[in-house]
Amino acid sequence: MRGSSRGAFAAGQRALAQTLRSGVDWSALVEDLFSMTAVLDSSASLRRALTDPSRDAAARRGLVSSLFGSRVSEQAVAVVSELAAGRWSEERDLADALELLAVETVVASADAGGRLDAVEDELFRLSRVVTGNVGLREALWDRGRSAADKETLIDRLVQGKVTPESLRLARQAVHAPRGRHFDRVLETYVAVAAKRREQLTAVVTAAVPLDDSQRHRLAQALSGIYGKSVQVNVVLDPEVVGGIRVQVGDEVVDGTILRRLEEARRLLAG
């Protein structure tokens, strides 16, 4: 998001945080927010109406209330009303923001239950499985297949093997890809989980698995470099002859950044 959309989204995040502290049923709130996202996705005219700068904030809040007040909780209406009251650079940003707030609620639930680490790791691993399986990736992208059929594919793959929060987000990614491949949607959700933990996520490509001690040392090294906690996710690639490749956001730590690579190697060697 750019420009005014960032400010509007931040206001929505503050409203969500207040709502989560109010004692609301988080699971019910998730379903309400995702259902409202689906409505926005299905109606360009509604998105335009809720982001129209010629309407004052009170009118846009009133529109949210009139459309959703009898269908979802008052807490969900309050959160979306706060979003609608903001100014948006692009009308699609409103739906994007609402989806992210729903994901943040799922992630907050996992955090409260001590499952945040597991959710982040499970979603990352699932995204890599789908990325590495062309047939599965194409099946989940196939617009000729129903969402229910795609959900069945995901359920067969992960149901009973992951946390409830990971399963819910995987199902959401199938039902509402919003123009993105399934694995890309999951990467967005992983980023939300990482932000909840106030840390960066490092994708480490290596020929062999790293043990817990190596992961810990590498995480410490990267934390020293970036000045904040770093979650290490490992991708195995047999074509990597030796050493490791570390990507944090757009930055790649490899042989072209010798000081950081040597520091990581020394720490891994103990």
Image (spheres, rainbow, N blue to C red):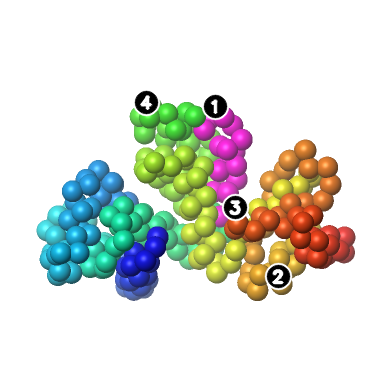
Q: Which residue is mark 1?
A: 135
Q: Element at badge 1?
A: helix
Q: How many marks?
A: 4
Q: Residue 127: within the magenta? A: yes
State the separation of the CA atoms marked 2 and 1: 39 Å
- Between the C-alphas of marks 1 and 3, the distance is 23 Å
Say what amino acid the circle numbered 2 marks.
Ile
Residue found 46% across the figure and 33% down from its top = 140
Q: Which residue is mark 3?
A: 121
Instruction: Indicate which disc, 1 or 4, sits on the residue closer to the N terminus.
Output: 1
Q: Residues within 10 Å of mark 1 (few under 14, many from 20)?
A: few
Query: For the residue labelled by badge 4, is the local secondary structure a helix, a strand or a loop?
Result: loop
Q: Which residue is depicted at the point 47% across and 39% down?
A: 181
Q: Nearer the viewer, residue 69 or 112?
A: 69
**Disc number lying in front (3 or 2):** 2
Q: Which mark is residue 144?
A: 4
Of tags 1 and 3, which is closer to the observer? 1
Q: Which contiguous range is marked in magenta?
A: 120-137
* Residue bearing mark 2: 225
N-terminal-most mark, 2 or 1? 1
Across and down, in percent, residue 37 comes to: 29, 51
| Mark 2 Cα-neighbour bin, 10 Å: few <14, some 14–19, many ≥20 | few
Q: Which mark is residue 231?
A: none
